């Protein structure tokens, strides 16, 4: 399998265009199941996860066509007819978010059989809240042999859905199902992430009546049918934050473009507090660090607008060479410190206890062979490799390919020494 090799020590200088958001794109693609007219998504990232969901949607009857137009990369999704309501285990287990086809399938065709996604390296990640929402909307849910059987032969009914805890995926799922329900649905304690706002905008362009996304109460007035639309995927705030951290780590000056300032304010404040220079621009920001060592700062992950859990691993990498001790608290996922032992292989000084990691900054990391454990963890190892002495090799980078488009190219254009080593076809143990 492929690996990434990074030779540490180069500063980053240049410009990085931010891609469309993976986490938004895959929910928007699922929205194509709700209409028999074509949905055109522009600013589409080309990633393993989007390819993968395209494959699943094709099996359900959606015609998926990728092209590069004047507006950049786009994907046309046309579900003229749903030919199957079955999402098998071997597809759903590979990408959890594909579970979100369940709601649109039931909403449009009254039934679906979708595999439960199973566990995940960063935590148990159950789907009870997703099922609770669909049941509230009147779907009959049965669980057998690892599959969810959902039925609503006379359609879904608008309802009040009160989530006991904030879940991005369950809020999106409820929204995707409720747009075709009969009557008004109100989602309470909804997630407020920008991807929810993006989904609302796309669904409304398709003729839905959704309001309140971005706040904790979302109101959806069901409509009988949706139409096709063209929608531009929101910029990827996690990719933007990742390159902001990479620039602060390596030093130099990097301009992030094609993004939206305001999506990662919490991270940018922490970078400034650590001593990096941050300048907001119309379509992103500029990150600068010229020589001086950064100071340790503490972070605690939280739902939006708090510090994103998807940027926690990258920030931990940054803190490994900062001056002093940083406390990093993870409050969203119970097992999201898998990158800590890998960073320690590079010479980082980290101790983990429960949901808190303490990172004592060292003067210099040393290149080593490390292993990616999940999507965001893998990029934290690349970030650490940017400053480690000698060469760092990251294996299992299929995690990285799930969520970062042309990473070597984007970092390489700013002067980083990053290359992909093609695998010999041997599976990694
Ligand atoms: C999404 C993002 C992921 C991000 C996360 C939190 C996608 C594809 N993924 O994941 O990158 O890290 O939001 O910002 O958009 N939970 C339950 N029951 C449920 C659902 C969730 O207990 O039915 C728990 C989870 O185990 C977790 C917490 O709720 O502890 C938050 O998870 P959630 O917001 O649902 O994350 P995802 O939507 O899976």
Image (tube, grey):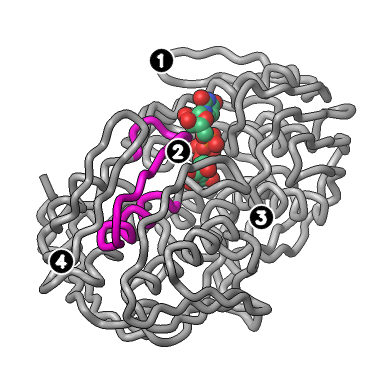
Q: Residue at x 61, y 31 (%)?
A: 166
- Disc number lying in front (1 or 3): 1
Label 4 crowd (10 A; few <14 / some 14-19 / many >=20): many
Label 3 crowd (10 A; few <14 / some 14-19 / many >=20): many
Q: Secondary structure at mark 2?
A: helix
- Disc number lying in front (2 or 4): 4
- CA distance for labels 3 and 4: 43 Å
Q: Residue at x 43, y 63 (%)?
A: 274
Q: Is residue 188 above or below residue 421?
A: above
Could you tell which of marks 1 and 2 lies nearer the N-terminus?
2
The percent coordinates of residue 418 (x first, y second) are: 24, 76
| Residue at mark 2 | 96
The stretch of residues the image draws in magenta is 311-336
Could you tell which of marks 3 and 4 lies nearer the N-terminus?
3
Side of 140 relative to 138 (left or right): left
| Residue at mark 3 | 78
- CA distance for labels 2 and 4: 30 Å
Q: Residue 117: within the magenta?
A: no
Image disc number at residue 102: none
Image disc number at residue 145: 1
Of residue 132 and residue 274, the one placed in the foreground of this image is: 274
- CA distance for labels 3 and 2: 23 Å
Q: Residue 333: within the magenta?
A: yes
| Residue at mark 4 | 392
Q: Residue at x 15, y 66 (%)?
A: 392
The quadrant of the picture occupied by the C terminus is top left
Cβ of mark 2 under 8 A from ligand 1: yes
- CA distance for labels 1 and 3: 31 Å
């Amino acid at each position: 399998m492929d690996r990434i090799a990074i030779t540490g020590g180069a500063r980053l200088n240049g410009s990085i265009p931010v891609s469309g958001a993976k986490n938004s794109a895959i929910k928007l693609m699922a929205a194509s199941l709700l209409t028999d007219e074509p949905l055109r998504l522009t600013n589409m990232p080309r990633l393993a996860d989007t390819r993968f969901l395209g494959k699943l949607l094709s099996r359900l009857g959606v015609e998926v066509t990728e092209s590069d137009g004047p507006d950049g990369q786009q994907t046309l999704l046309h579900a003229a007819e749903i030919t199957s309501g079955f999402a098998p285990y071997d597809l759903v287990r590979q990408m959890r978010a594909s579970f979100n086809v369940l709601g649109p399938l039931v909403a449009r065709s009254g039934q679906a059989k979708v595999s439960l996604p199973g566990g995940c390296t960063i935590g148990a990640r159950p789907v009870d809240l997703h099922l609770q929402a669909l049941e509230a909307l009147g779907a009959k849910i049965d669980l057998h042999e690892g599959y969810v059987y959902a039925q609503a032969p006379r359609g879904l009914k608008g309802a009040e859905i009160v989530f006991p805890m904030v879940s991005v995926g369950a809020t999106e799922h409820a929204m995707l199902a409720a747009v075709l329900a009969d009557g008004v649905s109100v989602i309470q304690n909804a997630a407020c992430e920008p991807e929810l706002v993006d989904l609302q905008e796309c669904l409304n362009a398709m003729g839905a009546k959704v309001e309140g996304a971005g706040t904790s109460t979302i109101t959806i007035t069901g409509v009988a049918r949706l139409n096709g639309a063209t929608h531009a995927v929101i910029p990827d705030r996690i990719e933007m934050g990742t390159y902001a951290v990479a620039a602060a780590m390596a030093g130099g000056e990097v301009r992030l473009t094609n993004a939206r300032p305001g999506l990662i304010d919490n991270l940018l404040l922490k970078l400034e507090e650590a001593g990096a220079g941050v300048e907001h621009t119309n379509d992103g920001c500029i990150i600068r660090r010229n020589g001086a060592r950064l100071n340790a700062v503490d972070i605690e992950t939280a739902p939006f607008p708090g510090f994103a859990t998807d940027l926690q691993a990258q920030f931990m990498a940054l803190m490994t060479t900062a001056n002093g001790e940083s406390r990093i608290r993870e409050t969203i996922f119970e097992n999201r410190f898998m990158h800590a032992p890998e960073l320690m292989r590079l010479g980082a000084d980290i101790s983990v206890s429960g949901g808190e990691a303490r990172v004592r900054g060292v003067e210099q990391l040393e290149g080593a062979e490390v292993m990616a454990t999940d999507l965001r963890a893998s990029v934290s190892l690349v970030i650490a490799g940017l400053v480690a002495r000698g060469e760092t090799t990251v294996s299992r980078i299929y995690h990285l390919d799930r969520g970062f488009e042309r990473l070597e190219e984007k970092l390489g254009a700013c002067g980083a020494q990053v290359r992909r080593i093609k695998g010999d076809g041997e599976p990694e143990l």
